[in-house]
């Protein structure tokens, strides 16, 4: 009965360990998503850009509305006598109407500029997400470096004890072995102290990106998950050209200047004024007349504003055309720069994949070699220097493996940033 109970406990324990190992990367990804959400909600630069976008939207109803009507009041100090009586006061009102389609064209200009603002906000958001991810991965590498270095110190301490036992047993090179491992321990202690000191500014940078003081330590998975790009290289580049927020921002700016050309042309056309006047007339007391003292209403009054000075409007058209060309050149240059960035990012992605595979293989070989060397030293008391040298390689490969994992994920995050994801 006891044997069955122990088997069941061992079975549950192994299942729990398996679940922890399997679900740890998932928990890590969920935690990273929470950090990204916090950054999006709190980052002041992102808030500023969104407010600028909202302010740009308020420009649309401003430019799409008719000019304010004009109202004038006049009082005759010396009343003007007419057949029906003396004119006492006058009130007039008028409304200016620009050329057909001018207001809607101005609305299109403001709309495109607001869209450009939104794309600038999107680019900043995706850049923030990339910065949060890359900093998170750097922190993961640092935490793993601290853990691996600490574990290596424990292992070296056991080597030191083993070498001390050999020395006490009368092995003539035992003291040299003790001193060798002691030197390695001191070097690792210094490295560990530096790693711990490096953690503080990196956590501060992470908190600055989130714009919040973390109440708990940043949590990481036991083993970092590996992100991958699931489409081919050409599809990625096509996606960058089609979806990159900076390119889309420049496209909206070019469209706004194209609409501004249309606005300038319409401003160079006549505009119309329609109005009416009301004149107050007092009654005549010296004679009886039909409509005696009847107020006069004159409707309508029509006026035309003629843009005679064409240089002004031609210059407006030329300005908008030149601005449009400038934005198009900037867009072309940005496309070239993004292509270069993408090539570097994709190179780093492939390099990360190769390095993860390489260091997994090298770490396996190094651990096997270390086990053999430790066995030889324990049984025959030889090659202790090789034991230490191989232990350094194990330490190096473990650190390089974690860095390769982080670099692969950082490269994928950067490619996603370029694609506007």
Image (cartoon, rainbow, N blue to C red):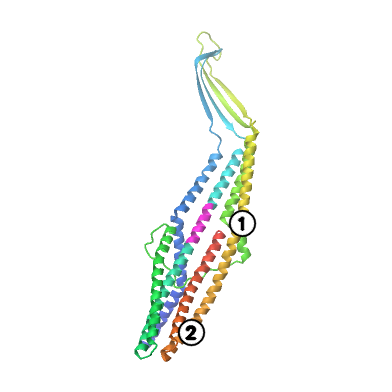
**Crowd tier of the residue under label 2, counting other residues whose Cα lies within 10 Å: few below 14, some 14–19, many 20 or above:** some
Magenta segment main secondary structure: helix
Q: Position of residue 297 (x, y in %)?
A: 56, 22
Closer to us: 374 or 204: 374
Percent across and percent down for residue 283 are 51, 13
Q: Residue at x 39, y 78 (%)?
A: 183
Where, by quadrant of the figure, is residue 343 drawn? Answer: bottom right
Residue 100 seen in the figure: no
Residue tagged 1? 335
Tell whether label 2 touches label 1 (CB within 8 Å). no
Residue 369: numbered disc: 2
Q: Which residues are magenta?
A: 120-131
Q: Nearer the viewer, residue 245 or 163?
A: 163
Write down the quadrant of residue 229 in the picture.
Answer: bottom right
Q: Where's residue 38, x and y in %? A: 44, 59
Residue at x 43% of width, y 85% of height: 384
- Name the element at disc 2: helix
Query: Image quadrant for the C terminus?
Result: bottom right
First reached walking from the N terminus: tag 1 or tag 2: 1
Q: In this orientation, does residue 283 appear?
A: yes
Q: Could you say which disc has been placed on residue 399 in the image?
A: none
The local crowd at label 1, few if under 14, some if 14 to 19, many if 20 or more residues have their Cα within 10 Å, is some
Q: Residue at x 49, y 79 (%)?
A: 363
Q: Nearer the viewer, residue 191 or 325?
A: 191
């Amino acid at each position: 009965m006891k044997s069955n109970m122990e088997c069941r406990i061992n079975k549950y324990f192994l299942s729990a360990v398996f679940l922890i190992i399997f679900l740890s990367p998932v928990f890590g990804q969920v935690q990273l998503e929470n950090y990204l959400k916090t950054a999006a909600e709190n980052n002041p630069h992102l808030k500023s850009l969104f407010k600028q976008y909202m302010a740009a939207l308020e420009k649309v109803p401003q430019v799409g509305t008719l000019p304010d009507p004009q109202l004038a009041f006049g009082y005759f100090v010396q009343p003007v006598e007419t057949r029906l009586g003396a004119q006492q006061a006058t009130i007039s009102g008028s409304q200016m109407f620009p050329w057909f389609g001018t207001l809607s064209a101005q609305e299109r200009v403001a709309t495109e500029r607001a869209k450009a603002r939104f794309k600038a906000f999107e680019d900043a958001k995706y850049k923030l997400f990339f910065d949060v991810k890359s900093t998170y991965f750097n922190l993961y590498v640092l935490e793993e470096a601290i853990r691996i270095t600490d574990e290596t110190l424990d292992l070296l301490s056991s080597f030191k004890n083993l070498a001390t036992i050999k020395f006490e047993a009368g092995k003539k090179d035992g003291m040299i072995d003790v001193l060798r491992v002691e030197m390695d321990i001191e070097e690792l202690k210094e490295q560990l102290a530096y790693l711990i000191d490096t953690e503080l500014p990196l956590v501060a940078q992470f908190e600055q990106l989130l714009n919040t003081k973390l109440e708990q330590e940043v949590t990481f998975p036991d083993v970092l998950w590996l992100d991958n790009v699931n489409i081919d290289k050409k599809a990625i580049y096509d996606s960058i050209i089609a979806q990159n927020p900076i390119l889309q921002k420049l496209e909206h700016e070019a469209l706004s200047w194209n609409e501004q050309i249309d606005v300038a042309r319409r401003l160079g056309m006549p505009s119309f004024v329609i109005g009416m006047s009301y004149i107050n007339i007092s009654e005549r007391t010296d004679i009886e007349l039909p409509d005696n003292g009847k107020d006069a209403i004159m409707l309508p009054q029509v006026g035309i504003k003629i843009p005679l000075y064409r240089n002004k409007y031609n210059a407006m058209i030329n300005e908008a055309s030149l601005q449009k060309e400038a934005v198009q050149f900037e867009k072309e240059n940005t496309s070239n720069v993004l292509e270069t960035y993408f090539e570097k990012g994709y190179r780093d992605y492939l390099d990360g994949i190769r390095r993860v595979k390489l260091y997994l293989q090298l770490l396996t070989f190094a651990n096997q070699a270390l086990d053999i060397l430790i066995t030889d030293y324990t049984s025959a008391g030889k090659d202790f220097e090789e034991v230490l040298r191989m232990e350094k390689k194990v330490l190096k490969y473990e650190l390089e493996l974690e860095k390769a994992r982080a670099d692969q994920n950082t490269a994928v995050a950067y490619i996603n940033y370029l694609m506007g994801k």
